[in-house]
Amino acid sequence: MREGSHYTFGDQGPAAERLRRLASLYRPLSASVLEQACVTLGVAADLAIDLGAGPGYTTELVAEVTQARVAIGYERSPAFCAEARARCGGSLDFVELDVGAEDLPIQNVDLGFCRFLLTHLPNPLETLGRWKKALRPGGVMVFLEVERLSSSDPVLARYYRMIEGVQAEHGQAMSIGRTLEALVQKAGWRVVDSQAVDPCLPASAMATLHRPNLESVRKDPWVQGHFKPEEIDEIAVGLERIGAETGKGTPIDNVLRVVIARA
């Protein structure tokens, strides 16, 4: 077994609620991309997988859109797997596995989905190569990652600098979408489609996602070494303020990279 990956935002406490909000916000874009992947596949998917399933919201979406006979969510967190199983009532399969460090124990996958996961892995190129072995010839994988995330608002700008720094400290890349297409190709996949997409999410909605993340990272040694406690508190207050500004347009640049590739 390889060394496990580090998940910056944790898998305890408010993390599950954050992922529920994230799943809701990105559902329209994710569903659209999955529909495009089904067209690319060209046949009905028999087996579909969701990598980094969290509490199972993305796995439910994968199953709904693809109508696959079997849909499996792979997730390293026992707590998230337990929550997913309890909520889905046995209609979907969830396997406890660190997909960033271990081989996928499955073959002949028709369609795979991977959203906001590669950004948390220290060795994405190696991981992409291992995942390819699980897909059947002609199988399709969907990748969705952040390409740009910035803002002229000082609170959001400081928050993004914090997250970028703490992820870099753990060998990760917040904006891995910038190199996603090249990484996928280098790992031996054939890129079918690659596009930059703006999900057009308001800053208020993004701030509601960022606020619990701040609590997850504020005790990280890198964060404590680069941000004073009072500065972190100021960012927290600012995020709460932006989250309440539903009628205002705080400037935010949120661009994602979507790559669809064949094994």
Image (cartoon, rainbow, N blue to C red):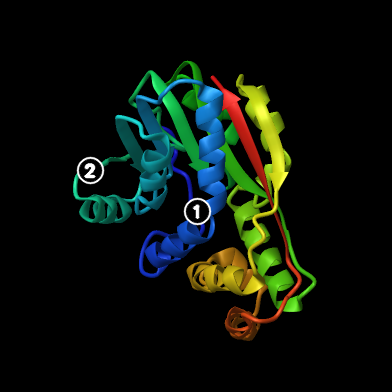
Residue at left offset 65%, top offset 52%? 174
Residue at left offset 63%, top offset 28%? 184
Q: Check the picture and name the quadrant holding the N terminus.
A: top left
> Dot 1: what SS?
helix
Identified by mark 2, the residue type is: Ser
Disc 1 residue crowd, few under 14, some 14–19, many 20+, Cα 10 Å: some
Contact? badges 2 and 1 (CB < 8 Å): no
Residue 176 image offset from top left, x and y in percent: 67, 44
Residue 221 image offset from top left, x and y in percent: 56, 66
Residue 50 image offset from top left, x and y in percent: 41, 39
Identified by mark 1, the residue type is: Arg
Q: Which residue is mark 2?
A: 91
Closer to the chain start, of discs 2 and 1, is: 1
Numbered tag placed on residue 27 in the rendering: 1
Front residue of this view, candidates 66 and 17 = 66
Tell me if residue 123 can be seen: no
